[in-house]
Image (tube, rainbow, N blue to C red):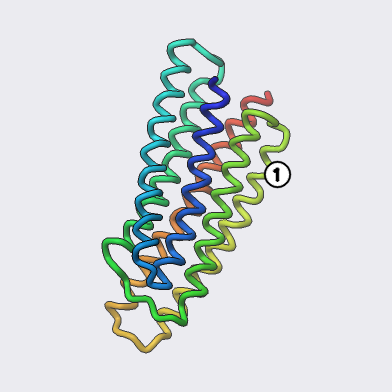
Amino acid sequence: MLEMQIDDFLNVISEAGILFKKGLIDYLKDNSADFEKRLHAVSEHERKADELRLSIEKELYIHTLIPESRGDVLAILENTDRVIDDIKEALQVFAVERPEIPEFLDDLFIELADSSIESVESLIRSVRAFFKDIASVNDHIYKVKFYEREADKAAMSLKNDIFNAEIDLSHKIHLRFCAQQIEKISDSAEDMSERLAIYTIKRQI
């Protein structure tokens, strides 16, 4: 039961990442109706992730499951949940602030989103491994870091192109802020992976 709930929790976060990428592409292509559907779906996934996390935490306490590492498991759930919060917040920035993105920046925005969401996917795989195949956790953590660095490079290229563009300074600053919201997703995934590396060492001692 608990294992299924943890799987469901991780599936929900993984799906939210996919929906985020599709939503961003819809935004760039001016598919407003589809973008709104993706935004709603991501919000629903975030709500479901919260419910699953609370249910798992309750199970852990009521049935005194895995008492030796319960604190670490709770921290893993709470910090992984923050990643889906960042995914939702990033998409909401586009919904609320409606940044005007010049078409020549579309590919770099998509490249940044791809790398950020790949880092989340690798994080999800590393958390699954923590519960099922602890020996492979570090292989997945390595990929989180790889994609976080790729996101950093894409963000830097994007910011360079933004500030070299012939648009108003206020427009440049707004676009940079939007890029930072996507970059923040991979930063959160990396932060969580570093914590997971410590929990993994503790379990292996």
Q: How many marks?
A: 1
Up the image or down, 136 lies above or below 182; here it is above
Q: As drawn, is 130 to the left or to the right of 43?
A: right
Residue placed most toward the observer, 41 or 188 = 41
Residue 170 lies, in percent from the top left, at 27, 77
* Residue count near mark 1 (Cα–Cα under 10 Å), binned few <14, some 14–19, many ≥20: few
Up the image or down, 180 lies above or below 55; here it is below
What residue is shown at x 37% (from left), y 66% (from top)? 178
Q: Farthest right residue? A: 135
Residue 31 lies, in percent from the top left, at 39, 68
Residue 192 lies, in percent from the top left, at 51, 42
Q: Farthest bottom residue? A: 166
What residue is shown at x 59% (from left), y 63% (from top)? 150
Residue 131 lies, in percent from the top left, at 62, 28
What residue is shown at x 41% (from left), y 42% (from top)? 45
Q: Farthest front residue? A: 33
Pointer 1: what residue? 139
What residue is shown at x 58% (from left), y 54% (from top)? 118
- Dot 1: element: helix
Up the image or down, 124 lies above or below 53; here it is below
Residue placed most toward the observer, 24 or 192 = 24
**Amino acid at circle 1:** Asp
Give the quadrant of the C terminus: top right
